[in-house]
Amino acid sequence: MNNKILIELEIPLIEKKYDLFIPINKKIGTIKALTENALKELTDNAYIPRNDSNFYSKETGEIFDVNKTVRDTELKNGSRIILI
């Protein structure tokens, strides 16, 4: 499991939290798109993906750059992020 990390994802829009394993070699933008599509299916369309949504650090409020890979960010096991 050296190529994945476990994060906590909070989605205020639907008032849910999920624990996700995400690959460290993928771009944040790719992970965001895949996550949003999965959320749409899991919530029976209660969550609708938006073009202006972003991942934010719950600790710092920093927006994660969609062009960086997870490896190139400060994300690590146990990181908490918000999808807004």
Image: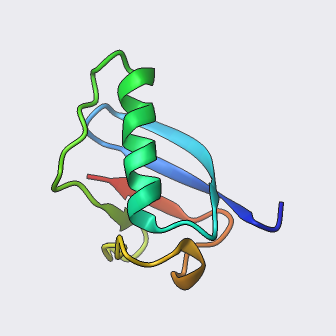
Q: Is residue 80 left or right of residue 71?
A: left
Residue 60 shown left or right of residue 3 in the figure: left
- From this view, report whether residue 46 is shown above or below residue 38: above
Could you say which quadrant of the image residue 19 lies in? top right
Front one among 72 and 13: 72
- Which one is in front, 80 or 31? 31
Q: Is residue 1 above or below residue 40?
A: below
45 vs 74, nearest the viewer: 45
Q: Position of residue 31 (x, y in %)?
A: 47, 55
Residue drawn at x 44%, y 44% as measured from the top left: 35
- The quarter in which the N terminus is drawn is bottom right
Residue 73 located left or right of residue 41: right
Residue 15 point in image, percent of width and height: 34, 33
The residue furthest right is 1
Residue 6 against residue 25 in the figure, above or below: above
Residue at the (37%, 41%) spot, across then down:
36
Q: Is residue 49 left or right of residue 76?
A: left
- The residue located at (25%, 52%) in the rendering is 84
